[in-house]
Image (cartoon, rainbow, N blue to C red):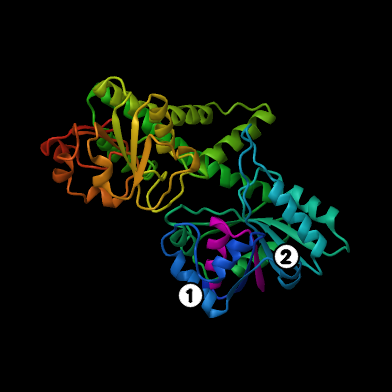
Amino acid sequence: MNILIIGTGYVGTTTALVFAEMGWKVTGLDTELRKIENLRQGLLYFYEPGLDEMLIKHTGSGRLQFTTDKAKAIRDNDVIFICVGTPSRPDGSADLRYVQQVAEDIGEHMNGYKLIVNKSTVPVGTQERVTDWVREAQVHPHPYDVASNPEFLREGKALEDALHPERIVIGADSDHASGLLQQLYASINCPVIVTSPRTAELIKYASNAFLAAKISFVNELARLCDPLEVNIKEVALGMGLDSRIGPKFLQAGIGYGGSCFPKDVAALLLTAQELNVRLQVLQHVVDVNQTQYLYLLDKVRNRLGTLAHKKIALFGLAFKPDTDDIREAPAVRIIQTLLQEEAEVRICDPVAQLPAELKVSSVAFSTSPEEVLDGADAVLLCTEWPMFRDLDWTRLKDRMSRPNLFDGRNFLDAGRMTELGFYYEGIGYK
């Protein structure tokens, strides 16, 4: 089988590379010529550990090619994965315009049986809509199946998750479609769940919503830990040792961000609203997350008073380490609030870049921690990059106007920082 990946973004590029690594012949299709030309040259346009080496490997091996010729790509490939974006609309719903366009392109150019697979994260019922869109666009009637095969990739760990997944979910209405997908994944050793397309689509949303709920739960609990003088890290450790709970996603901080959790939780809430179902727990998950970064800023204000004309350094801009993704990043919300309060902001991140709207005179950006700490009244750690743990904090303290350290990820050792002379506060952790 020849595989076509439509959409060479984060999910599409990772999917294409992993199938090539598994030995399949893969074509990546995108409408952006510059993006395709870069990929052909082995140049990855986003940061994800391990993918750049694999891109060079498989563009050289001949198992992976990239094109902008959608008609030929659709004709020449048997299995077509839809990996285009589904951004949120203002009301929280998923924008399916790109999925619809791909479905119509497939219908127009298909020349025989095709297995069409939704890899993009889409609302429940999208498989049925794609089926209709393909049929309505067909110039000549050809048989096809539409299946759902959601991705479960963590940014920063995408290659590991794709090569060694904890499960593969296949949502298909026909045995032929599910059989083909199981054949594609035959070399992967993990549980395979075969179910209906609607169930597969909901599994994706439900998984991300539950993980978001764990994060908001521990963040809200951390707010209680501060007045109780209890260490949230020890509470989370004690909870996480219970196999029914587990330790993952129990790290208190300034909230979740990225391209998945905020978007998927909002879409699931909207689906429930449309069906007159109240998901009260999930709504509270969102409410906690939208205010968690303010909890850190309250700590800063309690220490510094007004933030006007204060020099505030931020360590970390990306929503998590090992990625350059700043979508829905808590650090961005913090910067926006600091600017509204007329603070001077200095930011250090090893890979993420400032968005255009934050490139203003009162914001300075550097990859050098020393530069951003010069004369600072406080430093806020917003992303737990390993480089920040390994800094010479004794030397850095002397560069600051006032050695105030607010650890938004509970990443540093509170006792050590205090011994070094910092005023240290974390989230439910001192």
Quarter of the rendering occupied by the N terminus: bottom right
Q: CA distance from mark 1 to mark 2?
A: 24 Å
Q: Which residue does the numbered mark 1 point to in the structure image?
A: 57
Quadrant of the rendered structure where residue 67 is?
Answer: bottom right
Residue at x 27% of width, y 20% of height: 305
SS of the residue under disc 2: helix
Q: Among all residues in the image, which is located at the extreme front?
A: 361
Magenta segment, which residues?
1-20
Residue 232 is a magenta residue? no
Quadrant in which residue 83 is drawn = bottom right
Residue plotted at (24% across, 48% down):
389
| Above or below for 97 versus 222 | below
**Is the residue marked by circle 1 packed among few (<14), some (14-19), or many (20+) residues within 10 Å?**
some
284 left or right, relative to 71: left
x, y (%) of residue 300?
A: 29, 26
Q: Residue sitting at 30 percent across and 20 percent down? A: 306
Q: Residues within 10 Å of mark 2 (few under 14, many from 20)?
A: some
The type of residue carrying mark 1 is Lys
Q: Are marks 1 and 2 in contact (CB under 8 Å)?
A: no
- In the figure, residue 417 lies in which quadrant? top left
Which amino acid type corresponds to the residue marked 2 in the rendered image?
Answer: Lys
Q: Quadrant of the C terminus?
A: top left
Decide: is 42 above or below 416: below
Q: Is residue 415 visible?
A: yes
Residue holding disc 2: 70
Locate residue 1 relative to residue 246 in the image: left or right.
Answer: right
Which percent across, then down, holds residue 404?
A: 21, 32
